[in-house]
Amino acid sequence: MSKETLGFQAEVKQLLQLMIHSLYSNKEIFLRELVSNASDACDKLRFEAINNDSLYGNDAELKIRVSFDKDAKTITIADNGIGMSREEVIKNIGTIARSGTKEFFSQLSGDAQKDAHLIGQFGVGFYSAFIIADKVTLTTRRAGETGATQWVSAGDGEFTLEDVAKESRGTEIVLHLKEGEEEFLSDWKLRSIIRKYSDHITLPILMPAQAGYNEDGSIKPAEGEETVNQANALWTRSKSEITDEQYTEFYKHVAHDYEAPLAWSHAKVEGRQEYTELLYVPQRAPFDLYDRERRHGVKLYVRRVFIMEDSEKLLPQYLRFIRGVIDSSDLPLNVSREILQHSKDIEQIKSGCVKKVLGMLEGLANSEEAADQEKYATFWREFGKVLKEGVGEDFANKERIAGLCRFASTHNDSAEQTVSLKDYLGRMKEGQEQIYFITADSYAAAKNSPHLEVFRKKGIEVLLLSDRVDEWAFSGLTEFEGKKLQSVAKGELDLEQFTDEEEKKQQEAAATELKDVLEQMKSVLGESVKDIRVTHRLTDSPACLVVENNDMSANLERLLKSAGQ
Ligand code: ADP
Ligand code: MG
């Protein structure tokens, strides 16, 4: 096909403007983004080549090249990775072919820093080229194909596509710099940006050698190329050799995030399965946390070869916000998604990683340091609802996860979830055997429930559960540290031990007095109720509905009804 001119999707246009504005104060990240894409493209080639060696042709050493031309005012970033077909160029570079686009735009705040974070997780790094360039030329040839495609755009709403010749596989991107951006036409500047942001990239990033002096003082001519980065997998280095900055930059690359992570866990695990894990907790929930077509997850490597990125098989659903890498020493290189599904080895790695993540969260939650507690509060605000799914989902770890949960409670008059089950246990009344909770549609509904009256009166704390997931999650948790969890809206409440003699007398008198009334009510209501009891649950409200211990709660019944069950 010859040359054609296509328009960007409307959202892309909007995004380009936004990108340029919100990232202008941090222009140099364009290089990080383009190098990151080049590295991803090489990872993809390696993975496809596992089953098709011929894709390498005679060019098996994957690398990234960065160079500049002072006279032409251009910077070039080239890789010999997977490349793109014409269709792929249109799909990947011309449109944002993802669900949630609208939602993304609705979340933009105008606050440059917040928006930059959204831009990052949306995966639009490529467009950062337009922060410093007024024209970008991308020439690409897909591995295994002979023809190549050239994409050219000034970032103003249109791009052209043309069939061209390209000698070898991969992608070459030429940035034609805007007036005033000449500072980037410098060997020193580009090298320092690469070292700062891309040191962890596992492939060599090459730049033309500069003339200078060798260590022995002899003159080194400007010949050939030099590797600028360390080019070894960050997670294979020992912890003591990695700075926090390096951990952070690596996170931004694997997680496609612009913000620093909240915490990480890095360990080499030996035993039946040998693997290295480097797992991060992000600082903010991605906008697609509840989207079934989530793009990012944890990356699986086998002996430093990228295999796949997956958000389901490597960690359970309730930890789907975790990012990072797992590098196995034992799995075969040709492992497929299907194999992973049923692999015992993966199960072991998965359960090991779950323990690491829970341990890392406990580390923050139980820390004496104010900074860590602050981090845990942030974590809970962003991901608490998702973690709670684990109480219902992960039988083996449910008590541990419950220990990490935070609740609103009658103890403190706030919708904010800050009370742990441990806090609750510490405040239990003498003789109290159960952990009381109530579930409702909202915090206000829970807080104002008539079921709480008697507890308020007796000074017994009740946890107020009002997230959608609570009903389901906590129906499976019957005990915590030997104490039963009891819904205050279910069955008989055994508050006997908190009743004083005077109250007891009153209650007995009431029971005799009401005996006849009860009999009468039962005969009138008949089959429509299971039982009618005299109760001391209520002190101010006239009546309330109670379900049997094993029955669905009224709240769950309402939820299921609204879901059409
Ligand atoms: P992300 O990297 O988060 O997917 P980008 O905007 O950085 O988002 O890139 C968009 C897409 O363009 C990539 O997912 C990839 O499919 C394609 N792409 C970008 N750069 C390259 C490259 N050098 N080689 C092959 N494909 C690329
Ligand atoms: Mg990218």
Image: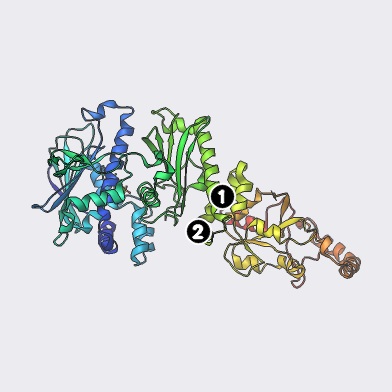
- Which of the two residues, 156 or 421, is positioned nearer the viewer here? 421
Give residue 484's position: percent from left, percent from top: 73, 52
Image quadrant holding the N terminus, namely: top left
Q: How many residues crowd around disc 2 within 10 Å: few (fewer than 14), some, or many (20 or more)?
A: some
> Label 1 is placed on what type of residue?
Glu
Vertical arrangement, residue 210 with respect to residue 169, above or below? below
Mark 1 lies within 8 Å of ligand 1 (Cβ measured) = no
> Label 2 is placed on what type of residue?
Lys
Give the numbered dot on residue 375: 2
Give residue 349's position: percent from left, percent from top: 50, 36
**For marks 2 and 1 on the same chain, the one whose residue lies earlier in the sequence:** 2
Q: Is residue 93 visible?
A: yes
Task: Please give the residue where the numbered disc 1 appears in the rendered image.
Answer: 389
137 lies left or right of 109: left
Vertical arrangement, residue 113 with respect to residue 74, above or below? below
Residue mark closest to the camera, 2 vs 1? 2
Q: How is the model colour-coded?
A: rainbow
What SS does tag 2 mark?
A: helix
Mark 2 lies within 8 Å of ligand 1 (Cβ measured) = no
What SS does tag 1 mark?
A: helix
Q: Is residue 18 visible?
A: no
